[in-house]
Image (cartoon, rainbow, N blue to C red):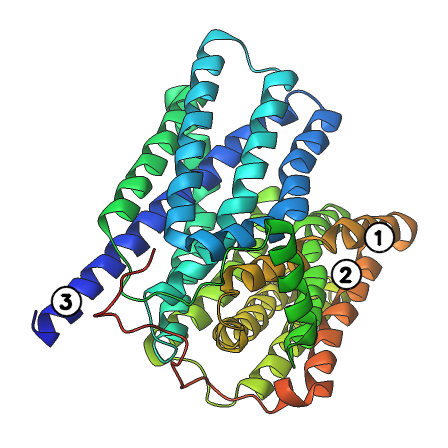
Amino acid sequence: MRVADRVRSRSAGRALWIGGSTVVGTADVMLFFVIAWIASGLGATASTLINLLIAVPRTVLLVFGGTLSDRFGARRMLIITDSCRVLTVLVATVAIMVVPPGLAWLAVFTLVLGVISAFSMPAASTMPRLFATIDELPKLWAKVSGLAQVGRMIGPPLGGVALVAVGAAGVFVIDLAAAMIMIGVLILVRPPYRLPAEPSSESVLRQSWAGLRAAARTPGIPSMYGATALVASGVLPIVFLCLPLLARERGWTAAATGVVEAGWIAGSLVITLGIARWGILHRIGPAMITGPLLAAVGAGLLAAAPAYAAALVGFVLMGIGTVVYTSHLGPLLLDWTPAGMVSRFQALFVLVQSAPQVVTIAAFGAVAELVGPASATGAAAVICAAAGLVVALSPRLRTATRPVSDSGTSDPDSVAAG
């Protein structure tokens, strides 16, 4: 096959994978919106339980999911998990047609989805590396994350419209169809690159522990994870907890509050589209310091300035700062990951974002209850700013530059990804 034909073939496969991932991601957002809506009708306790049944399995099993993805390959792992998802959603679709939505079957359904997602998320985070060299990765990462952001933005309203138009069972069928399409894409498309795999002679538990040890010992990685935990602990509670409380205290309407929250997405998309077009900066370290500080300034503006316009500007700055940080971190993390451990390091990357929120959301909620949501937002801003300090104090992160080597990728002409 000529070089030009190989390039066109790889580009077509990559475009098909990006399209399938965007469709299934949007369908998942629609499904979880409907699940949350059904749970809210069963009471606050039911809603809390349903959210925990999704979050807890992810937190507990993510590292094991990453280990299995490293062992069997990200593509194979996604085919397996998407097939499990199809079976689960199919059973739930039949159940919702036969039995009115109740807490028992909804709890079982969400628990299973939480377990499946723990094994699929590390593999899904690894897939971009199988479609790009290190040099190409920042732009591809930006395209994938930008489309994912669009899916998260349009998923809830689409879920609401679909719920009215075709009912909960109809939304389940939409998610079922999207998962089946993704399985077809994964079977049809073979990524052009394959990452080195570790020998599978050891048990999953031992390999998981080896991944944790490697992450702790790889220079720069502990600081990277620590900074990421601080960014997630600062930004996400503001979006999901502090903003609604501030809005009610300041007398904003629900529509106005939605516009402010959309400012976070708008700021994110502006930077994402710019990176998809021009790539990331050569000096990654300063960008990873600046991003959290910009997000902290935006959060501080939201806390200190009660005017609606100031809040909107603050949320735009939060979106810009967050994506400046994550878009430069992502390719660097993949470049610094030891051979054969990509999915395990990606699993830990997801874990350090989600696990601390169990504590920080409760803490910020208590602060908001005692001294007001503005104080909770200010505290979150300080935590976010601390992430920039963590990066600045790490010599390897502070001086990091854009990855250019591609030594961890196999020759695309000699082997296809598993």
Q: Is residue 194 visible?
A: yes
Q: Secondary structure at mark 2?
A: helix
Q: Earlier in the sequence, mark 2 or mark 1?
A: 1
Residue 7, position in %: x, y? 17, 71
Q: Which residue is mark 1?
A: 363
Q: Is residue 82 above or below residue 312?
A: above
Q: Which one is closest to the eye, mark 2 or mark 1?
A: 1
Q: Is residue 63 above or below residue 313?
A: above
Q: Residue sitting at 64 percent across and 51 percent down?
A: 205
Q: Earlier in the sequence, mark 3 or mark 1?
A: 3
Marks 2 and 1, how far apart in space?
11 Å
Residue sitting nearer the eye, 260 or 319: 319
Within-10-Å neighbours for mark 3: few <14, some 14–19, many 20+: few
Marks 3 and 2, how far apart in space?
49 Å
Q: Secondary structure at mark 1?
A: helix
Q: Earlier in the sequence, mark 3 or mark 2?
A: 3
Q: Residue sitting at 58 percent across and 37 percent down?
A: 114
> Quick check: 202 left or right of 360?
left
Q: Which residue is mark 2?
A: 377
Amino acid tagged 1? Ala
Q: Which residue is mark 3?
A: 8
> Quick check: 151 left or right of 106?
left
Amino acid tagged 3? Arg
Amino acid tagged 2? Thr
Within-10-Å neighbours for mark 2: few <14, some 14–19, many 20+: many
Residue sitting nearer the eye, 338 or 144: 338
- The quadrant of the image that shows the C terminus is bottom left
Q: Secondary structure at mark 3?
A: helix
Residue 158, position in %: x, y? 41, 37
